[in-house]
Image (tube, rainbow, N blue to C red):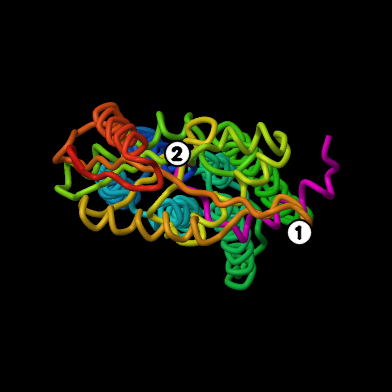
Amino acid sequence: MSTLRETLEDLASALRERPDDLLLEIGAGGELLVARLRVFVACLLMLLPALNWLAGGSLDESLAGLAGAVGVLLLSVAWLRLALRSRRLDWLPMFSSCFDVTLVSGVLALLGLWGSPVATLNSTVVWSCYLLAIFATAMRHDLRVTLVAGLLALLQSALLWLWVVATADEPLVSAEYGSVSTSTQLQRLMLLAVATLVAAVIVFRAQRLTQWSSTDGLTGLPNRSFLNSQVPTKVESARREGRTLSLALVDLDNFRHINAELGHLAGDRALRHAVAVIRRELGREEPMIRVGGEEFVLLLPLPVGAAWERMEVLRRKLEAAPFMPEPDVEPRRLTLSAGLACCPQDANDLSGLMKRADERLRAAKAAGRNRVVARDGE
């Protein structure tokens, strides 16, 4: 069980990390859900001006409310269209979260301009939407988004308080909303701070659970769960957008001999050594996935010829970096064999790419290992 201090330290450390592809993909789904919910709420807001007019409110006030509701609906539809795009927009969760918070502040400000200034500070229903906006960020699975939204709500709420107090020319008392008190406003700011912290911890824990479920414990690489859940989306996106994507199925040659001769602990160290050598050469857009034992998948956003050259560089790098089991033990040379398959030339889905890559990996091993095969008959 981690202590509160350890959780907060881990939370601070997570702020410096960029969410990985799996978290960003989950966050994109959450952003789409929030966008749809925002449109639904905006449609409900369209009813409020009519209700206000039927309840005896002025026509000018109702028309102004209708104009505001239409503006919110149009903006909400625009956010939804952006969330529906096939290419993920990394900036969208941050901007839309700030939009939600600012929308609440805007409604509170309009309440003060159209009616009593006390409504800006004491409208519990509208103010509570700050909390909804903060907790909705949990669906984005990005700790930074949650904290920025919470801090923005704190800042805007405090500025509204200062604005109302500075511009008031009469006592801040209303028969409908009561009186404005410093203690109540401070309590609300404290509640926003607590809600932000709670939401941040929820997001942090969700991030860690997601990462643990999709990460190989020995090497720190994405595991087969990641392969099955995320790679099909990447392949489909490449096919739809006309981009070339190569998949390499990689196997460390004769790795079982290291386990047999030096033991499984040394075998684990050798595996981590091989992964470290290869990962040093890979970019962020070239994920390496452990699919079992000493077998890996690499995704390369390259045509098959360039992907073969890339894999040749990795093969030579690994061959030139022998594994040192112990200071007094002879270094062991590690090599790899790999089979390549390319989308769309070889297949248009993960299953087809894995099948063709596996056939070429077998061909590489049959030809003597320590080589990369990119085409049939090589």
Where residue 280 sits: x, y (%)? 51, 61
Q: How much space separates mark 1 and mark 2, taking CA atoms?
A: 67 Å
Task: Kindly indicate the quadrant of the structure image that contains residue 201.
Answer: top right
Q: Amino acid at mark 1?
A: Thr
- Magenta span has 287? no
Tag 1, which secondary structure?
helix
Out of 235 and 183, give the one closest to the viewer: 235
Q: Position of residue 310 (x, y in %)?
A: 33, 58
Quick one: 105 or 34, which is closer to the camera?
34
In terms of secondary structure, what is the magenta stretch mainly?
helix
**Near-viewer residue (337 or 163):** 337
Give the amino acid at mark 2.
Asp
| Local crowd size for mark 2, using a 10 Å CA cut-off: few (<14), some (14–19), many (≥20) | many
Q: Residue at left 28%, top 42%?
A: 340
Q: Which mark is residue 251?
A: 2
Dot 2: what SS? Answer: strand
The residue shown at (31%, 42%) is 247
> The magenta stretch spans which residues?
1-22
Q: Residue at x 27, y 49 (%)?
A: 87
- Name, please, the residue furthest toward the bottom: 166
Q: Which mark is residue 131?
A: none
Q: Earlier in the sequence, mark 1 or mark 2?
A: 1
- Label at residue 182: 1
Q: Is residue 124 above or below residue 332?
A: above
Q: Is residue 21 magenta?
A: yes
